[in-house]
Each structure stands twice: as structure tokens, then as C-alpha cells.
Image (tube, rainbow, N blue to C red):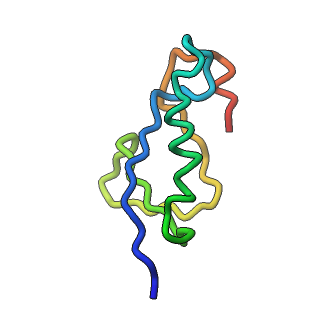
Amino acid sequence: MTEKQPTVFVPHGGGPCFFMDWNPPDVWDRHRRFLEDLPASLPAKPKALLVISGHWEERVFPLQTNPAPPLLFDYQGFPQHTYQLT
């Protein structure tokens, strides 16, 4: 029998926030620890992930099955090096 997995809301901050220099430098440490500890808190390894994003709108419900979907930059005004992240 498959174990039930929890529903988890994972906020991502603004754009490339994890790849920018911050003051104080530990501003995202609690969030990083949450993400690092998340797999160990699950009852089993997930077989699939459902991601719901407010960054994309379609008239018809889309289903993304590409294991390496393209990266879309829907932000601007961040340090130039953050636009090279993939």
C-alpha cells in the first residue's frame, strides 16, 4: 500500500534570491535548512511531484512531463549573473 505524503507549501522568495549577496548574509539560512531537512521528514521517497505555480496561466490545464523543462525568467532587475543560472 502506498503511504500518504504530506502537502507542502515551498515558498521560493523573489527570483534568484538564493544566488544573491544579502546583508545580513544569513537571511535565507532558515529556509535553506527547511529545504535540506524536507526529504528526511517524508514517510517515503515521492514517486512524483505536483507543482502549482502562479507564474503561468493557460486556458487549458497543462501537464509538464519533461524531466528537464526549460527555465523561464519572469523577473528583471536582478544581478546579471543570476540570468545565467540553469
Q: In this view, does 47 lie above or below 38?
A: below
In which quadrant of the rendered view does residue 55 lie?
top left
Identify the residue at image location x=62%, y=16%: 21
Quadrant containing the N terminus is bottom left
User: Is residue 46 or residue 24 the one in the foreground?
Assistant: 24
Q: Find residue 57 and report its horizontal and vertical position in percent.
A: 34, 46
**Above/below status of 86 relative to 64:** above
Closer-to-camera residue (52/64): 52
Q: Residue visible at 30% across and 54% down?
A: 59
Quadrant of res 45? bottom right
How many numbered discs, if any? 0
Residue 43 is situated, as x and y percent measured from the top left of the image, at 49, 69
Vertical placement of residue 27 versus 44, above or below: above
* x, y percent for residue 16: 56, 28
Query: In the orientation shown, which residue stands out farthest toward the bottom?
Result: 1
**Image point (68%, 39%), residue name:** 86
Viewer-closest of 59 and 39: 39
Q: On screen, 52 above or below 80? A: below
Whole-percent x, y for residue 50 in the image: 43, 61
Identify the residue at image location x=60%, y=52%. Answer: 69
Q: Quadrant of residue 20?
A: top right
- Residue lying at the far left of the rendered structure: 59
Residue closest to the far top? 23
